Image (tube, grey):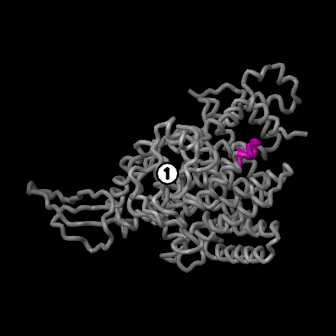
């Protein structure tokens, strides 16, 4: 018998006109109310996959609101121009270019050499997040793929995974997204999890494909190796860090995040206790300061005066030219590779991201090692399986050493430059549960500490309100799924169910108000109204990963909660 969610999804794909009272009356009593109540949002998600799908055969794939420039499509060097691309050139007036050289590894392309920037070719269709994000993103795609698989769109999901293999083969690594200005960085390594999700769907359908898994194994190994060699190593810890190969402010941020770097500079001027290594100064007489860091971005004039109590002229310090340092921009770029832009997790504006071994990244690498162990066994590579097992065990031990804080009952990032654990409480503390490296006692401690981050609308990112969108009070779909599935993995179902319902009902309630699903939500007010003061300020409509997470959380919701959620959907909104 089909599950309740399968029935819901099937009905959601139909036109809303089919949801007549007679049709619902024919459904079993325990599902009728839920189908009637949840049908609109499920229909929105099911139809949204096509709305958000892009390919090299459609003009809308080339639009980039982050960079105002004529559309350009870049193909790999020595790659024949497909007929569909030639047609795209004719139909859309797009300029077609080939990359100047073959790319074998990340860090070999200077993104500043592209004038203008453009879209990078991919062979298969892909789902974009929505709004300003009109390309295939590294970690967004995992949560999108989870939704596609749950919605029966396995072929589209597999095509996206194959696109990442194409990126590794022709662009050197899994990129932040397929734009030329993203050549300098990746995003959190969810690729093995994407492969396992598609493979499991194939297995359940009786369509196991050993040849595809063997290909996947090769590319997963290459992706893993990028994260486990310099410059992605976190000092001598044996762990990894986020790192961007570029220099100075990233092109997309300069054009799309108006005033951001001015605000950061002002912060460090007013908070000198946090400014060490973050600013470069030059005196008005052009004598350079002691800093050896070159000036890469915009400079700002600063003059400090003391107003005396007499009527005499104020005493002023010499005017200074102040700019953000090269090290700050390295941290800013690394923060963007982490996906958590912007937060204060790695110091103010995360300007020290590259100085930390992060809980999230190393949990994902641990899971990659476990996934590769499993794939090795399925492919009959016993010696490889043993190697991956040892690597995972070694990483697990190292992470326990550096990240776990017994007294706090939380996992914290580790500042390897200062040789000290962070004290910043962040939602990524649940990654070790999701990846399975935590102990049962640690899982119980984390569940006990849920009130630190749990709010009426779900799990808030942090306890610090920084004006960054990845801090308090905002709730993001990916972290809800990570936390919920981590709790379920350790048989903490009651906490998982409660957290699921809080977020699902927030999304559903706001959908009922205006018929959209958003990038992020306010966990305190249970609304999509946000006041972001750092970085881009929109709350994008779409939205790929929220759609996917909604389906996954809904699938595992207990029957009683599913019924309650359906009834709430039927209640007229009292919101103004």
Question: Which is more toward the observer, 237 or 171?
Answer: 171
For the N terminus, the image quarter is top right
Q: Is residue 378 left or right of residue 215?
A: right
Q: Residue at x 8, y 57 (%)?
A: 312
Q: Which residue lies at the image location 86% right of the left edge and 23% below the top edge? A: 25
Q: Is residue 527 visible?
A: no
Q: Out of 528 and 160, give the one closest to the viewer.
A: 160
Q: Residue furthest bottom?
A: 236
Quarter location, residue 357: bottom right
Residue 351 locus on image (x, y percent): 44, 63
Give the magenta-colored segment's residue range: 146-155
Residue that carries the numbered disc 1 in the rendered image: 74
Answer whether residue 400 is magenta in the image: no
* Vertical arrangement, residue 19 with respect to residue 212, above or below: above
Residue 424 location in percent, x, y? 54, 63
Q: Secondary structure at mark 1?
A: strand
């Amino acid at each position: 018998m089909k599950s309740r969610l399968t029935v819901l999804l099937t009905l959601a794909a139909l036109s809303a006109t089919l949801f007549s009272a007679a049709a619902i009356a024919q459904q079993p009593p325990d599902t009728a109310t839920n189908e009637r109540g949840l049908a609109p949002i499920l229909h929105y998600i099911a139809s949204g996959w096509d709305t958000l799908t892009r390919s090299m055969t459609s003009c809308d794939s080339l639009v980039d609101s982050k960079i105002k420039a004529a559309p350009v499509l870049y193909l790999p060097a020595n790659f024949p121009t497909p007929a569909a691309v030639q047609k795209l050139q004719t139909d859309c007036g797009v300029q077609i270019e080939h990359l100047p050289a073959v790319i074998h590894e990340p860090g070999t392309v200077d993104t500043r050499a592209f004038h203008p920037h453009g879209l990078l070719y991919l062979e298969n269709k892909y789902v974009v997040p929505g709004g300003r994000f009109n390309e295939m993103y590294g970690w967004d795609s995992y949560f999108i793929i989870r939704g596609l698989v749950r919605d029966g769109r396995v072929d589209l999901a597999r095509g996206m995974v194959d696109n990442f293999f194409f990126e590794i083969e022709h662009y050197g690594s899994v990129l932040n997204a397929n734009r030329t200005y993203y050549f300098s960085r990746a995003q959190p390594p969810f690729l093995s999890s994407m492969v396992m999700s598609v493979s499991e769907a194939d297995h359940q359908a009786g369509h196991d494909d050993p040849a595809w898994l063997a290909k996947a194994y090769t590319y997963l190994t290459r992706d893993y190796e990028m994260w486990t060699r310099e410059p992605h190593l976190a000092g001598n810890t044996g762990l990894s860090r986020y790192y961007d190969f570029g220099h100075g402010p990233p092109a997309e941020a300069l054009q799309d995040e108006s005033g951001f770097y001015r605000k950061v500079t002002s912060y460090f001027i007013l908070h000198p206790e946090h400014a060490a290594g973050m600013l470069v100064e030059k005196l008005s007489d052009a004598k350079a300061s002691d800093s050896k860091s070159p000036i890469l971005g915009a400079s700002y004039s600063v003059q400090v005066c003391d107003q005396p109590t007499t009527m005499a002229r104020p005493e002023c310090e010499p005017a200074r030219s102040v700019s953000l340092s090269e090290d700050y921009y390295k941290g800013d770029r690394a923060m963007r590779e982490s996906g958590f832009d912007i937060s204060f997790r790695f110091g103010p504006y995360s300007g020290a991201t590259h100085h930390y071994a992060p809980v999230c990244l190393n949990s994902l690498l641990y899971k990659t090692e476990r996934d590769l162990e499993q794939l090795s066994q399925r492919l009959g590579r016993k010696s490889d399986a043993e190697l991956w097992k040892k690597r995972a065990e070694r990483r697990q031990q190292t992470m326990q050493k550096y990240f776990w804080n017994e007294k706090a009952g939380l996992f914290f990032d580790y500042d390897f430059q200062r040789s000290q654990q962070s004290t910043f409480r962040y939602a990524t503390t649940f990654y070790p549960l999701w990846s399975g490296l935590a102990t049962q006692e640690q899982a119980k401690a984390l569940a006990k500490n849920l009130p630190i981050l749990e709010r009426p609308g779900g799990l808030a990112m942090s306890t610090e309100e920084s004006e960054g969108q990845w801090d308090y009070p905002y709730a993001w779909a990916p972290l809800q799924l990570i936390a919920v599935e981590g709790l379920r993995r350790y048989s903490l179902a009651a906490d998982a169910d409660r957290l699921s319902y809080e977020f699902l009902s927030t999304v559903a309630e706001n959908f009922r108000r205006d018929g959209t699903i958003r990038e992020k939500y306010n966990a305190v007010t249970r609304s999509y109204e946000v006041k972001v003061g750092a970085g881009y300020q929109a709350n994008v409509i779409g939205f790929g990963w929220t759609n996917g997470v909604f389906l996954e959380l809904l699938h595992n919701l207990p029957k009683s909660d599913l019924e309650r959620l359906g009834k709430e959907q039927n209640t007229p909104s009292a919101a103004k």
